[in-house]
Image (cartoon, rainbow, N blue to C red):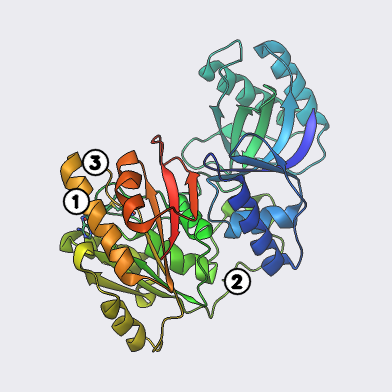
Amino acid sequence: MIIDELRIVGSTQTNVVMHAELVRVAQRALGRRPPEPRKEGLGTLVYPFDPDLAWAAVTYLRTPTRVVWDVYRSTAQRLEPLYDELVRDIHLDPRRLFLDGDGISVEVRRVDEFAAGERQIVGTVKNALIDGAHARRVRLHVDPERPVTRWIARHDDRNELIVSIDLGGGSLAHRGWRREAGEAPLREHLAAILLMLARFDPRRDVLVDPMCGSGTIAIEAVLAARAMPREAPTLAALELARDRKAVPLFPDAAPLVVGCDVDLEVLAIARDNGRRANCGDAITWQRADIARLQPSTIAEIAAEHGRPTIDSGLLLMNPPYGERLEDPELATLYAAIGETCKRFGAPWRAGFLVATPLFEKVLLPILGAPRIKKPLANANLRAYFYLWDL
Ligand SMILES: C[S@@+](CC[C@H](N)C(=O)[O-])C[C@H]1O[C@@H](n2cnc3c(N)ncnc32)[C@H](O)[C@@H]1O
């Protein structure tokens, strides 16, 4: 069946955040709100397809991992009927999804219920695309390295097979600025999610990541504040970009961002990453042990950047969770984090992504109950996001 939907895919538990970001982006870039989405599970939103919304989503969203255009749906359980249905749909489809001579690639995800292996499904979808296009006098070929369009086949939550075009041309979590990563770097889209969950307001908040590692949270904060666009060749190939200019939505945003780490080498990596992301000017990198980090140090940095008083501040971090440290050492570090947060006090708030119950055990007696505690997977670790008003 020919379908026409925009699918926004992200980490589990992030539907609310992804929709909130799309609302903000669409209002600013298109001057209108998107419709309410259909939710599929805890990490997928589906909207009626709209080329302008697709353009805005691919160009500006930072919290999802993929934005795809769902174009065919099939209830077939076996390869032959799947092939026949797809060829028929592609033949009849009036949309301009490819041009003569285009290279394509096909991948599958979440197709465990299908009565065939992944490679066979890839082969069937690929053959159907090539043969269906051929019936329209369009020649396609497979080019896994540099495809014009990347196609994805996956089961939705009703176990129907959806065939989509990956409009971002791959994972949106890779922003392209990260070369060296430091220890346990945070995936970039998760940093964007943390900033949304903590309601980072670049006009008011001074943002500090006291354990910044490769600098992901600090760099994302600057890029999100400016709403920097991403290049999207697939949109151009499909003529979805039209005459739209991909410019920063808030070019004048001047967020005040500080990244600290106890490890000088790691800090040098963060600085290089910041330069590659073109936000080196907006971030102050400062060597500091979180146990000794003083609000006065941050106040001095803020004053140097033209903010003599801090009306609102956000400490946002993802502390080590035990991959290198043993529990007693980790408990000491967490206690130091708690004491430092207490020292900052109002008007600061503190947000954390952590994957160990030890964190809560140590922090609760120091800071009391958090305002927000929300499950948020970090890669395949069961983690939580916490936010305290200090
Ligand atoms: C899980 S990593 C943070 C990763 C980071 N969010 C990123 O995206 O790369 C934890 C960081 O805490 C730093 N760290 C450990 N103990 C510290 C301390 N006492 N004070 C400040 N930073 C510390 C480590 O050097 C490491 O870079």
Task: Tell me which amino acid carries mark 2.
Answer: Leu
Q: Secondary structure at mark 2?
A: loop
Q: Nearer the viewer, mark 3 or mark 1?
A: 1
On the image, numbered disc 3 is attached to which residue?
Answer: 322
- The part of the image, by quadrant, that contains residue 216 is bottom left
- Give the Cα distance between marks 2 and 3: 39 Å
Compared with residue 198, is residue 13 higher up or lower down, i.e. above or below? above
Q: Position of residue 267 (x, y in %)?
A: 23, 64
Q: Which residue is located at x 75 percent, y 56 percent?
A: 34
Q: Relative to 375, is 286 on the left or the right?
A: left
**Cα–Cα gap, marks 2 and 1:** 43 Å
Residue 33 percent coordinates (x, y)? 75, 60
Which residue corresponds to mark 1? 332
Q: Is residue 372 left or right of residue 390?
A: right
Q: Specify which label sits upstream in the sequence, 3 or 1.
A: 3
For label 2, the residue is 249
Residue sitting at 32 percent across and 81 percent down? 299
Does 330 appear above or below 264? above
Ligand 1 quadrant in view: bottom left
In the image, what residue type sits under mark 1? Thr
Identify which residue, 336 or 318, lies in the foreground.
Answer: 336
The one nearer the camera, 201 or 361, is 361
